[in-house]
Amino acid sequence: MGDNKGMDRRGFLKTAAFSSLALGGAAALAGCAPAAGTDGGAALSSTGDIAWDKEVDVLVLGSGTGAFAALVAAAKGAGSVCLVEKGTMWGGTAATSGGGLAVPLTYAAADAGVSDSKEEIVKYFKNASDGRVDEAVLNSFIDNGSDFIDWISEEMGWKFVASPLFGDYYEPMEGWIPMGRGSLGAANADGPMIASQMWEEMKAKMEGYGVEILMGTEATELITDGAGAVLGAVCGDQNIKAGSVIVATGGFDHNDEMRAKYHPFKIMATNAVPTNTGDGQLMGMAIGANVSYMDRCWGAPAILTTGDDPATLIAEGTIAQEIAGTDWAMYRGLPGAVVVNKKGRRIGNEAGPYDLFNQAFAYYDTGEPGHVNIPAYFICDAACWATYSLPGHTVGAVGEGDGSYFDETYGGEATDPAEVPAHFVQADTLEELAGKLGIDPTGLTAEIAAFNENAVKGTDPVYHRGEKHLDINTTGVMAGSRTDLANPVLAPLATGPFYGAIYVPGTCGTAGGLTINENAQVVNTDGEPIEHLYAVGNCSSGVSGGTYVHGGISLGSGGVMSWVAVNHAMGATA
């Protein structure tokens, strides 16, 4: 879908597309009154009169990827746009991220000389998702991605750049490429930006267009007519009538009941904002919406720094709000570090993608029986401790600002290396460390001995650490692209004292939600679109079959499908 370049942005469309949607909703309002909801969600349906406090053309629920939807709607001429945000922090989880957008076949990829095709992208997504991806939705994402990036680049004055960091994660599946699809970075006139800067700039642009932003306002119910079409939503103490409602309320990371119901193993930590409690999914299900991929999450394991007892998290099904310890590729894959289970055995390729490593926690030992990898343990030696920053432990700036892990770009004021943060334990020997952490000492010493023998040669015959593109070009770069080692992500754990910490499965968002079609419309359990209702971001079923195909897929797909949703609601054509 392209931008309607020959059309006055705030003229014709505001009186045509959106007014027709609003009038259609009004005609259905013979009268509406509350009806009991189910399972934490609720709906208002046509059984009596309802008083509307506000009427808008577009109502967006959530300021994460929903910010894209509000911006597109306002810029394309919606007469009135209202965005409600449950929390007090603008941008939700999205604004806490690095800001990379995964969008294929863009000018950024072309500028980097990337050779790619729609056929290869579809092949990769289908393979990575084990065939679970909805091909119609995926095609819509691919077909609209370049238009969205072109539009937002012009609208915001941004330039996107492709990077080899956080490229395709499922190497060597057919269709995989090393870069060009994942984590396109945005820059403004002052240089590269992170998400918080991007979201502040979008907010300022929205406010310039007159978008009404209601912070600290929770959407609790969707309002429907007798035929099931959505007419608006209850937001805080207001009944807001809308021509279209775009749900962008995020995941259900902080809903203990939903995680227990849908996830196949315990998720113990998340860096998602606490307001991500599955509101959009519950509101949608209350009016008959279907849900998909509820068993999936955007995995992000973590060193547990919060002081939470892992046994309590497991027993009570609760989750730790973990920020500092979230391990994208900065800790477990460092030379001189490994992650092991209570038997002392390594659980995966520590230098690989964070989501893939998170899946190692799903292993169920039928002899135990149980998930023997939960919790696991991060372990490193004195050389690693002295060289790299870890949560609560900073080595300070070393280099000249060339972007390597331990230079002035990522450094900071050094902490006293003799001071060990409370979430770490220190021991002179591996046996002593095992005793302090509750690991089998015999298993650990045998495992590290075998690992060390191969690490000095730069090999890992067990999990093939350091053999894949991302291992070297993401984790290896973050580790300083070490040329003094046979492999930049492998070094033996040879020198005491040794350090250890609890390492747990985590998320940066759940990946399941309201099932959408190729127009980002929410569909009911019969597969039919629910009129005037759209979903984008982590509250939706997304575009990748619930699979973390490459870095930035949550933000990128949320942005593109926001573009798709608004264009469909406004009746735009390609």
Image (tube, grey):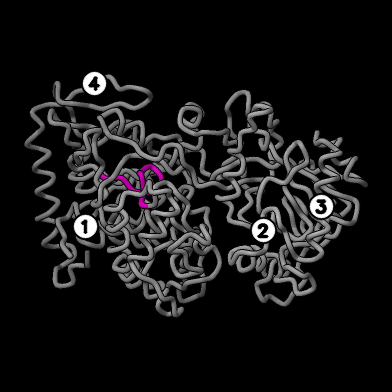
**157 to the left or right of 548:** left
Q: Nearer the viewer, mark 4 or mark 2?
A: 2
Q: Position of residue 316 (x, y in %)?
A: 60, 23
Q: Mark 4 to mark 1: distance in Å?
A: 32 Å
Indicate whether residue 533 is drawn in magenta. no
- What kind of residue is marked 1? Asn
Q: Earlier in the sequence, mark 3 or mark 1?
A: 3
- Magenta segment boundaries in residue numbering: 534-543
Q: Position of residue 216 (x, y in %)?
A: 42, 39
Residue 567 shows which numbered tag? Answer: 1
Q: Position of residue 353 (x, y in %)?
A: 58, 56
Q: Position of residue 564 (x, y in %)?
A: 26, 56
Q: Mark 3 to mark 4: distance in Å?
A: 64 Å
Question: Which residue lies at the image location 33% right of the left edge and 58% below the top edge?
Answer: 560
Q: Earlier in the sequence, mark 3 or mark 4?
A: 4
Which of the image's four quarters has the N terminus?
A: bottom left
Please determine whether, in this image, residue 404 is positioned above or below residue 23.
below
Q: Mark 4 to mark 2: distance in Å?
A: 56 Å
